[in-house]
Image: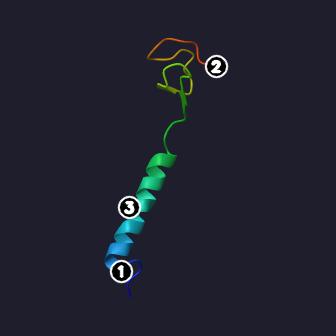
Amino acid sequence: MAFFGLENENLLAVAIVAVIVFFATASRRPSRRCSRCREINREQAVYCAQCGVRLPGR
């Protein structure tokens, strides 16, 4: 039986890739974006790594 045009083997492969992507992105460290330059900084950062502006809440 085909589901959206995928055979069982292909559907299983898509499901496995989806689970891997989910866990890979869920395990990332939290980060914060700089409001000035939009650089992604570590959660513990006090100043932006790119432009040096003080991050809010620190």
Q: How many marks?
A: 3
Identify the disc placed on residue 39.
none
Task: Check disc 1 and report its element: helix, strand or loop.
Answer: helix
Task: Check disc 2 and report its element: helix, strand or loop.
Answer: loop
Q: Taking 48 as reference, is 27 above or below it? A: below
Residue at mark 3: 17
* Circle nearer the N terminus (2, 3): 3
Label 2 vs label 3, nearer the camera: 2
Q: Are marks 2 and 3 in contact (CB under 8 Å)?
A: no
Q: CA distance from mark 3 to mark 1?
A: 14 Å
Residue at mark 2: 56
* Circle nearer the N terminus (1, 2): 1
Kindly identify the amino acid type of the residue bearing the numbered disc 3.
Val
* Circle nearer the N terminus (3, 1): 1
Q: Residue at x 49, y 11 (%)?
A: 52
Would residue 9 appear left or right of 45 to someone viewing this image? left
Q: Residue at x 35, y 79 (%)?
A: 5
Q: Taking 44 as reference, is 47 above or below it? A: above
Kindly identify the amino acid type of the residue bearing the numbered disc 2.
Pro
Would residue 13 appear left or right of 45 to someone viewing this image? left
Residue at mark 1: 8
Kindly identify the amino acid type of the residue bearing the numbered disc 1.
Asn
Q: Are marks 1 and 2 in contact (CB under 8 Å)?
A: no
Q: Residue at x 38, y 88 (%)?
A: 1
Q: Taking 35 as reference, is 54 above or below it? A: above
